[in-house]
Image (spheres, rainbow, N blue to C red):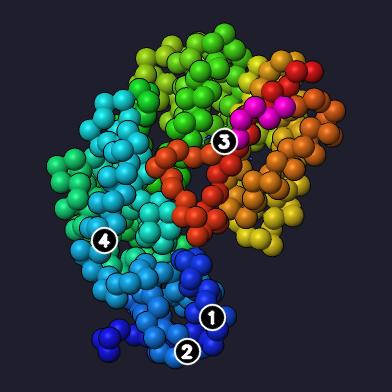
């Protein structure tokens, strides 16, 4: 294995690998970090020099993102296998590129699909990649060729972005023009159309993780007054309209999001008469708008980006949920989310309890919510469970 750069672990640390967590922190490393190139494929060896795993090295606190525990070669065939199995199981759960009802979904969910550092979303033939590690970005040719091989005719383009890396821009030869001219790619999610623009939008252009929860809202919207806060391009709002809501109010601080929300409303043929789109701050809206609603959705951006910030984030979630709860009519519902990786499910639930206590309302958890089947989480990597939500009923 002389052709691979080696990262050796401190004595006794090889046991960690039996837990199959996909990250090796720099504190566990004895040697090899100085010599290794940022983003190189490295093999991880025990203090006795035995092969343990292969991964991408990065000069950061996560020193190695593990890709394989058996296979030193990380080449195009490796990526093809991983991508093929990701595509296969999605088909088994009803997500297929050519499906008429839903032609957008997450294709690769990082660690959950055995590819730490890589996100891939499928938008009706367009694959949008996010490289979160130098290692993935260095192997982008393998990766993009592997996607083209596996997806064949069901994909017509690939765009690659870097995320949180010190590399400027996007890959070469990208289909940028269609996005600079228009509003982008049209996709269908559970029968509702959206325009996606990966160059202007957040994430890869759309929040695919909320698909099932949007459908849940649709099922409960008949005749309801619905407040959708942090509405982005209208995912929840359009589902409420489709479900027969009497009135929908969408609130987002981004004027791009509001514009897209309006366009998406029109693309789907809704009149807009019973849909008010407010461009503004949610906290101010909740303080100032006197209306009450049957259903209130709170889907804020991640308040905590790191563990250090989690205390402040908990306070912000509590405040937001307290104000949101006040807007729910008796007998109504709160649908509330956190997408902060560092806020675990139990802590989130405790925070909602604290908010309900503060506003003195009897609240019942009816359902615990999460992302759809295209967002697998490795059992060895619980940190991957970032999106958590609660459907709460208020009977008083
Ligand atoms: N629910 C959305 C996704 C929400 S993403 C969906 O299903 O697609 C979070 C959104 O919150 C972003 O659109 C961002 O513009 C908006 N946002 C962030 N801070 C805000 C604030 N203080 N007030 C209003 N909107 C805010």
Q: Tell me the residue that label 3 is attached to.
A: 369
Ligand 1 within 8 Å of disc 3? The answer is: no
Q: Tell me the residue that label 2 is attached to.
A: 47
Rendered view: 341 above or below 142: above
Rendered view: 273 above or below 266: above
The crowding category of the residue bearing disc 4, from other C-alpha atoms within 10 Å (few below 14, some 14 to 19, many at least 20), is: many
Mark 3 or 2 closer to N-term?
Answer: 2
Q: Is residue 88 left or right of residue 162?
A: left
Residue 79 - label: 4
Q: Is residue 367 magenta?
A: yes
Q: Assign a secondary structure to mark 3.
A: strand
Quarter of the rendering occupied by the N terminus: bottom left
Q: Position of residue 352 (x, y in %)?
A: 73, 38
Q: Tell me the residue that label 1 is attached to.
A: 13
Give, as a single range, the part of the protein colored magenta.
364-369
Mark 1 or 3 closer to N-term?
Answer: 1
Image quadrant assignment for residue 61: bottom right
């Amino acid at each position: 294995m002389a052709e691979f750069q080696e990262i050796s672990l401190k004595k006794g640390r090889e046991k960690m690998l039996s837990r199959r967590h996909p990250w090796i922190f720099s504190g566990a490393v004895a040697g090899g970090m100085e010599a290794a190139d940022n983003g190189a494929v490295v093999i991880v060896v025990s203090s006795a020099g035995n092969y343990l795993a292969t991964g991408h090295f990065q000069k950061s606190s996560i020193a190695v993102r593990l890709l394989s525990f058996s296979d030193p070669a990380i080449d195009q065939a490796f990526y093809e296998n991983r991508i093929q199995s990701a595509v296969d199981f999605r088909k088994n759960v009803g997500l297929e590129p050519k499906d008429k009802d839903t032609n957008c979904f997450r294709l690769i969910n990082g660690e959950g699909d055995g590819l730490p550092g890589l996100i891939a979303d499928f938008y009706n033939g367009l694959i949008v990649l996010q490289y979160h590690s130098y290692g993935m970005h260095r192997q982008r040719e393998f990766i993009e060729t592997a996607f083209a091989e596996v997806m064949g005719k069901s994909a017509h383009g690939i765009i690659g972005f870097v995320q949180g890396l010190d590399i400027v821009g996007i890959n070469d030869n990208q289909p940028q023009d269609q996005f600079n001219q228009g509003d982008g790619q049209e996709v269908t999610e559970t029968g509702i159309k959206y325009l996606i623009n990966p160059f202007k939008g957040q994430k890869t252009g759309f929040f695919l993780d909320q698909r099932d929860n949007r459908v849940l809202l649709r099922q409960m919207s008949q005749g309801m007054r619905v407040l959708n806060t942090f509405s982005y391009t209208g995912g929840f709002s359009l589902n409420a309209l489709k479900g027969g809501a009497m009135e929908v109010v969408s609130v987002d601080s981004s004027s791009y999001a509001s514009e897209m929300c309006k366009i998406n409303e029109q693309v789907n043929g809704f009149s807009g008469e019973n849909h008010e789109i407010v461009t503004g701050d949610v906290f101010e809206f909740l303080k100032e708008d006197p209306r009450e609603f049957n259903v209130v959705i709170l889907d804020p951006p991640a308040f905590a980006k790191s563990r250090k910030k989690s205390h402040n984030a908990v306070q912000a979630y509590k405040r937001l949920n307290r104000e949101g709860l006040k807007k729910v009519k008796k007998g109504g519902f709160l649908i509330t989310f956190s997408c902060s990786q560092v806020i675990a499910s139990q802590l989130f639930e405790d925070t909602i309890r604290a908010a309900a206590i503060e506003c003195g309302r009897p609240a019942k958890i009816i359902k615990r919510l999460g992302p759809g089947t295209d967002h697998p989480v490795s059992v060895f990597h619980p940190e991957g469970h970032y999106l958590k939500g609660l459907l709460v009923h208020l009977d008083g």
